[in-house]
Image (tube, rainbow, N blue to C red):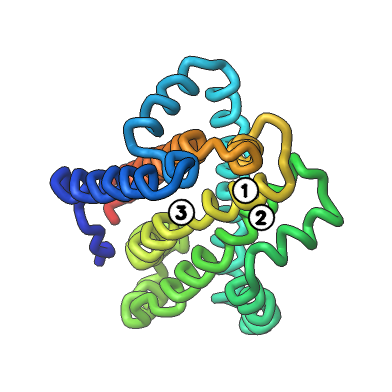
């Protein structure tokens, strides 16, 4: 069963934009530099359009996307392989359990600060994104494999169905819905964690570096503009990945 995702309604978006605009107007009226504390939606949109006309804007998006999505892909592959092995070998499952629990519970900033001791700032977003993505995908895939219909597996063994056909006909239909839900969650996590790592590590030419500069120089409009970029890019990549999963699942009959 696919998770429920409430649809974005234009009237709801317009409502919150009006709330944002009203808040900005109140701040400007009350404080002499209220527009610095809370830029309006119009100011943020103008700033975004100005940024979009520069090469550094697109380079920052490209550099951050490569690092963060690289970490996502590495974690996806590793999590699926280890989940399959853990489902087969109880020892490996017990061995990984404390590590997964620590990664799930510990604050991401702790890992970022620790990783800065070991890694260059350019490799930090990839590592942190992979670290945050691994637990949800690993746990969802492991759960799906362990809860695969045992009667179907027993029937496949009785009739000596090849493992390749078991994989396509039994395991994949059980795993794909869980994997899809995990990917939807993990893509949001990897962008949040990856950009946070960039803000702290400040790799050259990244979105995190631009956010840090906007904070240092009180460029609130830039801050909102870059935040909008992160949200849009994350949503686009999520849609693309989910479409790819659905297409592959449709081809194998899941």
Q: Which residue is mark 2?
A: 128
Nearer to the camera, 198 or 242: 198
**Residue count near mark 2 (Cα–Cα under 10 Å), binned few <14, some 14–19, many ≥20:** many
Q: Which residue is pictured at 48% across the width and 57% down the height?
A: 186
* Whole-number angstrom distance, CA of label 2 to CA of label 3: 13 Å
Asked if residue 48 shows in the view, the reply is: yes
Q: Position of residue 235 (x, y in %)?
A: 38, 44
Classify 62 as above or below 39. Answer: above
Q: Position of residue 89 (x, y in %)?
A: 62, 78
- Identify the mark at residue 60; answer none if there is no mark: none
Image-based side of 149 in relation to 218, left or right: left
Image-based side of 34 in relation to 24, left or right: right
Q: Which residue is pictured at 38% across the width and 31% down the height?
A: 43
Nearer to the camera, 45 or 90: 45
Nearer to the camera, 80 or 233: 233
Of callouts 2 and 3, the N-terminal one:
2
The quadrant in which residue 154 appears is bottom left
Which marked residue is nearer to the observer: mark 3 or mark 1? 3
Quarter of the rendering occupied by the N terminus: bottom left
Of callouts 3 and 1, the N-terminal one:
1
Q: Which residue is pictured at 65% across the width and 46% down the height?
A: 199
Q: Are marks 1 and 2 in contact (CB under 8 Å)?
A: yes
Asked if residue 230 shows in the view, the reply is: no
Q: Secondary structure at mark 3?
A: helix
Q: Position of residue 226 (x, y in %)?
A: 49, 37
Classify 1 as above or below 117. Answer: below
Q: Which residue is mark 1?
A: 71
- Identify the mark at residue 188; answer none if there is no mark: 3
């Amino acid at each position: 069963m696919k998770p429920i995702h409430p649809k974005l309604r234009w009237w709801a978006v317009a409502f919150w934009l009006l709330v944002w605009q009203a808040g900005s107007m109140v701040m400007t009226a009350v404080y002499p530099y209220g527009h610095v504390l809370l830029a309006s939606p119009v100011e943020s949109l103008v700033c975004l359009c100005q940024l979009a006309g520069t090469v550094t804007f697109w380079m920052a998006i490209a550099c951050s996307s490569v690092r963060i999505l690289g970490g996502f892909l590495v974690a996806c592959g590793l999590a699926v392989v280890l989940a399959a092995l853990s489902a087969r070998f109880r020892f490996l499952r017990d061995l990984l359990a404390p590590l997964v629990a620590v990664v799930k519970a510990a604050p991401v900033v702790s890992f970022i600060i620790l990783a800065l001791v070991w890694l260059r700032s350019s490799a930090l977003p990839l590592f942190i994104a992979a670290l945050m993505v691994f637990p949800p995908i690993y746990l969802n895939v492991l759960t799906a494999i362990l809860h695969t219909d045992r009667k179907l597996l027993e029937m496949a063994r009785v009739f000596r169905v090849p493992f390749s056909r078991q994989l396509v006909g039994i395991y994949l239909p059980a795993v794909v819905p869980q994997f899809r839900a995990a990917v939807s969650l993990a893509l949001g996590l990897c962008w949040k964690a990856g950009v946070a790592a960039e803000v702290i590590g400040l790799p050259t030419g990244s979105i995190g570096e631009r956010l840090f500069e906007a904070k240092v120089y009180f460029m609130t409009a830039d801050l909102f503009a870059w935040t909008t970029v992160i949200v849009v890019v994350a949503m686009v990549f999520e849609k693309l990945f989910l479409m790819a999963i659905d297409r592959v699942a449709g081809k194998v009959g899941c």
